Amino acid sequence: MKNKGIILAGGLGKRLLPLTKSISKHLLPVYKRPMIFYSLSYLIYMKITEILIIVKRSDLQQFQLLLGNGEELGLNIQYKIQNKPNGIAEAFIIGEEFISDDNVVLVLGDNFFYGPKLKDLFNSILNLNKGASIIGKRVRRPERFGVITKKDSGYMEIVEKPKIPKSDIALTGIYFFNSLCVDFAKELKPSKRGELEIVDLINKFQDAKKLSYFQLTEKDFWSDMGTPDSLFDVSEFVREKELKKLQLGCVANASYEMSLINEKKFKNIKGEF
């Protein structure tokens, strides 16, 4: 059984207009690299080489021009189309053939993670392979996200963008599932927002007692990049790290570090990725 990766990079990017009028938000620069490079690097550091990128049809050619089939990075990248923003959980229906009977890590293309032990956390979750695993983080404005409230019974209540959040723990945009995610996603009905909600899919795993929960620490940084302010904040964060000689979102470095490409190939593509 393999571990595969999906990056959801569709959507309309309405909160970033007019920046996104002619380009996918996932191709916007975050300091000096395209936004999607950061999501891709997380999968590479998990040594996941089979990756499906889900995009709008109008953006497909730009993504293919940027990343191709991934061969230069030691990856096998495929593409699928999401015609309308019908919800995060639709990614598993779109990716059914790609997922097959394997495990899958879904990363939202506009999410950013940084932390001293994140690689270890992600890889320990992969090795757990219980059914589904999610990661939470305490935030200042939880109403912008799915909100996790832990109950005394051990059950977690997860509500998508509540007007009055019951906790300050947000559901971050990386999800670990086994292949049951496809069948469960097919059983979902659209929410009042007209979407197949990821929280409804997670709750199906919880009801089946196949859900594990992890939480980022205060030292970990997580943000989405879906608003002008959050895009700027993450760019500034990355810039500060880069000035300290840390390279974030450099997929060429990640592939070389994980031995997906050799030194000669790395030198050939350095600067392009």
Image: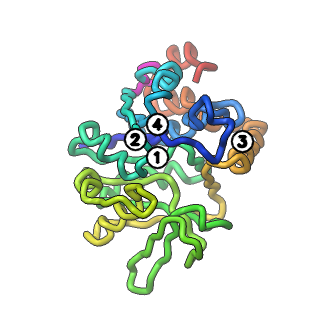
Secondary structure, mark 4, is: helix
Q: CA distance from mark 3 to mark 2?
A: 23 Å
Dot 4 or dot 3: first in sequence order is 4
Residue hosting label 2: 6
Residue 196 as seen in the image, left or right of residue 144: left
Q: Are marks 2 and 1 in contact (CB under 8 Å)?
A: yes
Figure quadrant of the N terminus:
top left
What range of the chain is rendered magenta? 70-75
Q: Amino acid at mark 1?
A: Val
Q: CA distance from mark 2 to mark 4?
A: 12 Å
Q: Is residue 91 highlighted in magenta?
A: no
Q: Are marks 3 and 2 in contact (CB under 8 Å)?
A: no
Dot 2 or dot 1: first in sequence order is 2
Name the spot of residue 67 as percent of width and height, x first: 49, 23
Secondary structure, mark 1, is: strand
Dot 3 or dot 2: first in sequence order is 2
Q: Residue at x 64, y 33 (%)?
A: 28
Secondary structure, mark 2, is: strand
Residue hosting label 3: 235
Q: Amino acid at mark 4?
A: Ile
Dot 4 or dot 1: first in sequence order is 4
Dot 2 or dot 4: first in sequence order is 2
Residue furthest to the bottom: 152
Which numbered disc, 4 or 3, marks the residue closer to the eye? 3
Callout 3 crowding tier (Cα within 10 Å): few <14, some 14–19, many ≥20: some
Q: CA distance from mark 4 to mark 3?
A: 21 Å
Which numbered disc, 4 or 1, marks the residue closer to the eye? 1
Q: Are marks 2 and 4 in contact (CB under 8 Å)?
A: no
Residue nearest the viewer, comparing 206 with 240: 206
Residue hosting label 4: 44
